Image (cartoon, helix red, strand yellow):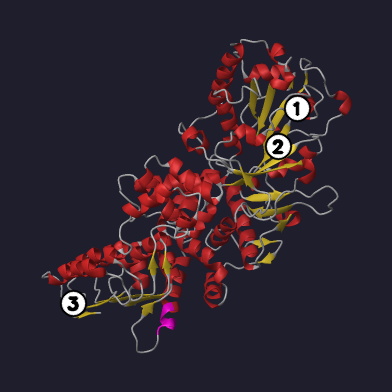
Amino acid sequence: EHRRDSREHMVRESHQDRELGTCPMESPSFHRRFTTLTISREPRSEHRAKDGAVGTSQGCGSASSGAATATTTLFEPGRDGQVVVLVGAPGMGKTTLVRKVMVEWREGTLHTQFDFVFCIDCKAIVLPMEASVADLVSQCCPGLRVPAGKILDDQKRILFIFDGFEAVGFSLVQPEAELSCDPREVKPLELTLMSLLKKRVLPKASLLITMRPRALGSLRRCLKGEYYVEILGFSAARREEYFHRYFENPNKADMAFRFARGNGILYSLCVIPVMSWTICSILEQELCGKKNLLECSKATTGMMIFYLSQLLQHRNRDNPQVLQQFLLQLCSLAAEGIWKHKVLFEEKEIKDCGLDQQDLLPFFLNERIPEEGEDHGSVYAFTHLHLQEFFAAMFYVLEDDGEMVSSLGRLEKDVNKLLESYNKSRRDLNVTVRFLFGLVSQKSIEYVEKTIGCRISPRAREELLEWLQGRHRGLSHPGQALKVSEMDTFHFLFEMNEKSFAQSALGHFTDLDLQDTKLTLYDQVALSFCIQHWAGLRCVTLQGCSFHWQDPEAELDASVPCASIVRQREELPCPIHLLCQALRHRDSALQVLRLQWCRLSESCCAELAALLAEHPGLARLELGDSSLGDSGVRLLCEGLRTPGCHLRILR
């Protein structure tokens, strides 16, 4: 009875110690949304920090099964005195996993392993200068009905959790002779904690320590026989599961996931749990009051800026110049790395750039700690390659007082050089260029200044406009209609998401010509946005293109439930719904529509019939190599009979 009461009280206390609602992990829907993370669990002798970006580790990653608890994932049943170090970058889910352990303990799942769990949030709790282990227990749970001393007598039934251990802020090198074996002995706080870590006091109690990779090196020297659990983020199957857990409405969950899955950048970033939350939060707002995401106005850049604002919330507000300078140096490092195909940076480069600020650096760069016997320093990498590409794009537009110089050399803010290199040979710069368009939109400029306090220069807008117009003029043959034939152009314009800019960029062109392109839902949304603001568009040719409203590989994925696939098939609009909807806009000048070798089916004919009926200017329609069927042709004929149809040629 005492144990049950104390369990409920301690969980209640741990909830009160936090500011509920300040973090996605701490919302009331936490239990419903919790999704199993992919982790790597290794003993000390085998532990190796992973090189490169988050989610690139191979071989050792393993996800616990859906039926496993967070605790059985972390601890081996039946073993006393276990020490587990949970390692991960900010936003990877360390605190979430701790909260899951606490919830399971409150619900009795842990009753067979631990009777008492004491969670100390090292980032939030105010610890005394001197304390015994018993004092720490009493401070965690001031209303305990059982004396702390009595609880500590059965030490193998106790779990101590130190969340965010890097925040304790004292040296982990303490004299062995000063350590205590008595849980009631009052000592300076650092000695009491070191006595717990080194198992001098309560050796049969278990420890769970969460921390960022940066602080791992000094902790290693204090522990013995510990296990390291590295959070690698969400696997592909877990990403989809998270979307379905986040949205209560399964139709909205399907639509949101298809939208993210169709955007390679967003889908890749969803490996980071807090990024999945960011994307779901924004798409939830877009879906509010709407039935679908067909009018989505949030491009990838907008989601990245929102993510950045959440990371930097409440940091350096009193001194925005420090944050501005840090971001300038970070962007310089990112840009030079992108130019040189470089994703790993040495410790000297970080220091030479002035980035060794522990209140900011861990939010953007992961650290690989050198193993014992290695003579080189730490190596750093951005938490994800797309984040490096985002900051590389920001380098070109973030205002500063002069040219940035880093340890890697001098890099000029030459937007034209970036664009021309992309056009000629450096197709790997695509994501950086896409972010560049998004950053100079008026919404982005205003939002960045409001939420982060940094200024983005709009000067690059004119260069981007001239480049877009010039690249397609060069691709069009003399004497022929000016046409746009690169899908990335529509991505760039959708990223900026400004009607007037799209009109200016496309105003000199009359034809759209795409060949053998697989159009995801995200591609179609971007294409539709551009078509709606393209008043001079007369001819659309989509030869050998395919229209996808769901991931075509989903049917081959055993982790996707059959019922989900069937439901998606039943509820999806026809493949060309978005295209036809965009072509029916008020100012459309469309005369020719070619959909050859697109393998259109009967389901497309109702949309085509509506387009024929409502578009008197449409004179030519080509549907070669389609499987319309008799009933499909009958639907098409209904459109041909309408008074508004002035079609002259049907193939």
Task: Residue 111: give x, y in percent of width and height.
Answer: 61, 22
Residue at which label 2 appears: 85
Quarter of the image with the C terminus in it: bottom left
Report the front residue among 351 and 53: 53
Q: How far apart are marks 1 and 3 (CA)?
A: 80 Å
First along the sequence among labels 2 and 3: 2
In this rendering, would 348 be left or right of 101? right
In this rendering, would 360 be left or right of 580? right
Q: Look at 64% across and 33% down and name the residue there.
A: 72
Numbered disc 2: secondary structure: strand
Mark 3 residue type: Leu
Mark 2 residue type: Val
Q: Give the magenta range.
A: 472-476
Q: Look at 70% across and 64% down and name the residue there.
A: 408
Q: Is residue 27 magenta?
A: no
Task: Residue 236: give x, y in percent of width and height.
Answer: 53, 51
Q: In this view, does 379 lie above or below 4?
A: below
Mark 1 residue type: Gly
Farthest residue to the right: give it: 177
Numbered disc 3: secondary structure: loop
Of the numbered discs in the image, which one, if any, rests on residue 81?
Answer: 1
